[in-house]
Amino acid sequence: MSMTHIKTYLSLFKLGIAALVAFSAVTTAVAMVGGISIGKLVILAVATTLSSAGAGALNHFFDRDIDRIMERTNTRPIPSGSIKNPSAVFWTGLFLVISSMIISSIALNFIVALHLFFGAFVYVVVYTLWLKRRSRWNIVIGGLSGSFAVLAGGASATPELCLPPVLIAVIMFLWTPSHFWSFAIVRKDEYKKAGVPMMPVVVGNVKTAVYVLLNTVLLVIASILPYWFGHLGVLYLTIAVISGVYFLARNIEMIYNPVKEVAWKNFKASMVYMSFILAAILMDASI
């Protein structure tokens, strides 16, 4: 297999998203009382990455028709013709998800495997196949995918469901709409052309910006709960509040000027916000 062929397949796996998902799982595991060994953290990172990468490949397979229409995606391997056999992408994605479940159930525990399965299931079946082309709320429910990765991280340290990973999962769930609706404003015309009812396509940029702000208010409130319940300390709270104020300021700017350029800044601000939240959890848990 040539290097070009390898790079083509790697682009199917949405490794940037997979890295964020794996990092959120590892962060949650570290934050658990009693901690987790380095070896298990590595296994958790690998298993979560495999599950997310597999789901990404399956998304490429099932969205190949609308990917041909959208400028952002028409250079992906399947619509561009770099991969001639789409079924190979399907089987590759399925293999990665199953491998993730096998590795995590053997090396960690069955609950971790179950959460990783549900994460992939929500992204591929619930979001991609069911809601994406049918509902303006598609990404809201689809956000559960990232939440399941967080729950997998918590279960790797403590299989029993407990409050800390649930609180972090809620943060991840509420972050997704604020993050993706901003991006959808930037790519509104492409989604409209492809017939995908993303929020800006259905209600316009102004109302979407309002929804983003309202959602971010809930997000910032949720980010304070780990401190409120005594699971994280003042360091985490300080970073969560400062980064939350920064993100809200970007949201407010988009309310007054909901154009692509401002929405793109808000999208990037959402990435900065989540990076700070995860880093704050890691730092506070390590003290």
Image (spheres, rainbow, N blue to C red):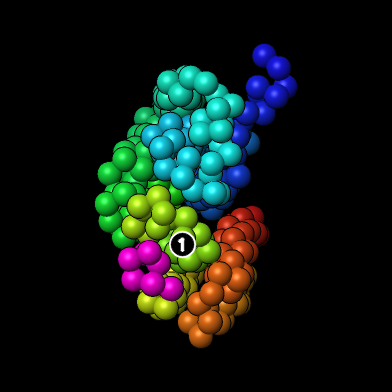
Q: Quadrant of residue 95?
A: top left
Asked if residue 3 lies in the magenta stretch, the reply is: no
Describe residue 182's horizontal placement relative to residue 119 as left or right: right
Q: Residue at x 67, y 28 (%)?
A: 7
Q: Is residue 200 inside the magenta stretch?
A: yes
Residue 239, image x, y percentages: 61, 71
Query: Where residue 243 sits in the image (x, y, percent)?
Result: 60, 73
- Could you tell me residue 1's position as x and y percent? 67, 14
**Can residue 22 be seen?**
no
Three-letter amino acid code at disc 1? Lys
Label 1, on which residue? 188
Q: Residues within 10 Å of mark 1 (few under 14, many from 20)?
A: many
**Residue sitting at 39 percent across and 34 percent down?**
62
Residue 231 higher or lower than 250, as above or below: above
Q: Position of residue 186 (x, y in %)?
A: 53, 64
Dot 1: what SS? Answer: helix
